[in-house]
Image: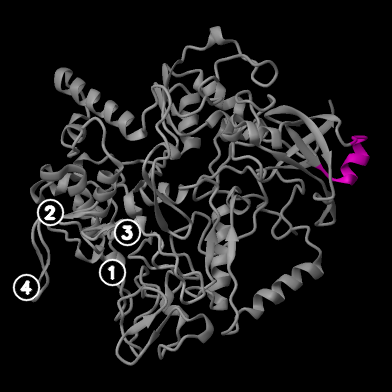
Amino acid sequence: ICGTPKADFLKVCDVLASTSAADRTTTFLYALGWTQHTVGAQNIRTMAMIQLLLGNMGMAGGGVNALRGHSNIQGLTDLGLLSTSLPGYLTLPSDKQTDLHSYLSANTPKATLPEQVNYWSNYPKFFVSLMKSFYGEAAQKENDWGFEWLPKWDQAYDVIKYFNMMDNGNVTGYICQGFNPVASFPDKNKVVRSLSKLKYMVVIDPLVTETSTFWQNHGESNDIDPSAIQTEVFRLPSTCFAEEDGSIANSGRWLQWHWKGQDAPGEARNDGEILAGIYHRLRELYRTEGGKGAEPLLKMSWRYKQPDHPESEEVAKENNGYALADLYDQNGTLLAKKGQLLNSFALLRDDGSTASSCWIYTGSWTEQGNQMANRDNADPSGLGNTLGWAWAWPLNRRVLYNRASADINGKPWDAKRMLIQWNGSKWVGNDIPDFNTAPPGSNTGPFIMQQEGLGRLFALDKLAEGPFPEHYEPMETPLGTNPLHPKVVSSPVVRLYEEDAIRLGKKDKFPYVGTTYRLTEHFHTWTKHALLNSIAQPEQFVEISEGLAKSKGIANGDWVKVSSKRGFIRAVAVVTRRLRTLNVNGQQVETVGIPLHWGFEGVARKGYIANTLTPNVGDSNSQTPEYKAFLVNIEKA
């Protein structure tokens, strides 16, 4: 089914199964090779299920861990920059949730088993604290904390959806911040066509990108007529990470503070300054001219020392959260004074007495200072658990669900890799307990974010394809069938629009599998602006197996043309043993490997955009495009 020799596959299974022993653990480290498929979410869920069955969740060196494609992508999801999200993994209200009560009822789970933590039962506290941070004094109980001011979504406006709307003429303008869709998004020709139908586009980026110059003709690689494009493009030069203070969140949920290395060149401003300028100009226009949607903007809290230049430290403290009144516990003990920074999300309230822009970040900047700036790399455990280095959400816990690392009596499954243990009166160890510190013998489960306290093999209503992972072929498959169930070849619930479906290819014209990937020497489309990187990997190439090269008469160093139903690129051929002919379902399957870094901007040799070839189809749950498996043809140029 997958092209792996049977003996090798069974060997991997045996090794994985051996980690069910108490003194053995394994981790799954996944990256874009798993996610960039129409079944990407199911790929990852499958591994999570295997880890649950093996007992590797909550263990030191266990779990399922993401290797992000970008630095700080973890921070992007933490802060709710997806189309239906709010910060802290809260959910943006839908148009069916017409009032605060219906919204909170839909998102606040009730415990299904006794004695469970069910920490999402605190959802109202997180949400009200968020609204107080957003709207300050304007958010009151009488107006449902400003619930009406939040946009209500009718469907997910992911990038595939948005560019389809753009292509259909339903979008007037586009603010493109830190994104290069012409190079990074599938079906580059459709992206350029879509951008050409805008009235205006604002590009916020420290570098010149193919998106900012999409309207220029660059010959075959971007063969368009600038005079036929109506879009007015505004470039706002921004800073890069080395030109500003701030935090970066990694896949281990560590928030690490970094300091500015130098000032930005020219007229560049940081993102905060740029957004502040847009914010103040919009407020001015609303005040003088009126218009729809004014209230959410005019009511927004904006309490910065320099309103046109919010400092990173101020934003970080907003994320952490403040006490808006003196906070007491049930016994009348003062926990925090009005105006103080909070040290735990356990202090958040749903009565308007606390504010936090991102509840999971509460504790990152306290009255004791910036915890993200901690730089003590001591590791007495020898496990790589450096609790004094940076700060991890939640509350500096380094291994999630670590109660599962000890047995029902509180004894570590593996004494040599102890995270926590019960000493007779409390939990101690090499990590912060990720639960409510219930003693051994209680019925409290380790999976505190689930209302039943248990790990789930059955996904309930969380995944579009159903409760269990299922094998589906890519939308463009070289097999033409699904070896496990031929009646349903590919996922029936992918993100695919009709105009994109007709641009899908078949194996009779495109008999080989194309897959895109990154090189060690480059970072996406950024580093082709850097001379050293461009010297290390100066020229665009594709990789093919020795067998495919022989059958097509292609020699190492030949120029080749790689085409899909959506377009073509030209590149140098590299014949390599890194790629092998696969035997899948009785068929010989060849792969064309396509590094993605080149384009028509930068100091590297000019090249074609690899995503000219990729299909505009998204994962059923995340809408992540299927960059890793599509059909192509290859021939000598």
Q: CA distance from mark 1 to mark 3?
A: 33 Å
Q: CA distance from mark 2 to mark 3?
A: 18 Å
Amino acid at dot 2: Gly
- The crowd level at tag 2 (other Cα within 10 Å; few <14, some 14-19, many 20+) is few
Q: Secondary structure at mark 3?
A: helix
Q: Earlier in the sequence, mark 2 or mark 3?
A: 2
Amino acid at dot 1: Lys
- The crowd level at tag 4 (other Cα within 10 Å; few <14, some 14-19, many 20+) is few
Q: CA distance from mark 4 to mark 3?
A: 28 Å
In screen coordinates, is 520 left or right of 412?
Answer: right
Is 329 above or below relative to 565?
Answer: below
Residue toward you, 621 or 595: 595
| Residue range highlighted in magenta | 544-555
The residue under the point 18% across, 22% down is 284
- Which numbered mark, 4 or 1, is in the foreground of this view? 4
Q: CA distance from mark 4 to mark 2?
A: 19 Å
In screen coordinates, is 429 left or right of 568?
Answer: left
Q: Secondary structure at mark 4?
A: loop
Q: Secondary structure at mark 1?
A: loop
Q: Earlier in the sequence, mark 2 or mark 1?
A: 1
Amino acid at dot 4: Gly
Is 74 above or below relative to 118?
Answer: above
What residue did someone put label 4 on? Answer: 332
What residue did someone put label 3 on? Answer: 371
Q: CA distance from mark 2 to mark 1?
A: 33 Å
- The crowd level at tag 3 (other Cα within 10 Å; few <14, some 14-19, many 20+) is many
Which x, y percent locates residue 331? 8, 76
What residue did someone put label 1 on? Answer: 110
Q: Earlier in the sequence, mark 4 or mark 3?
A: 4
Amino acid at dot 3: Gln
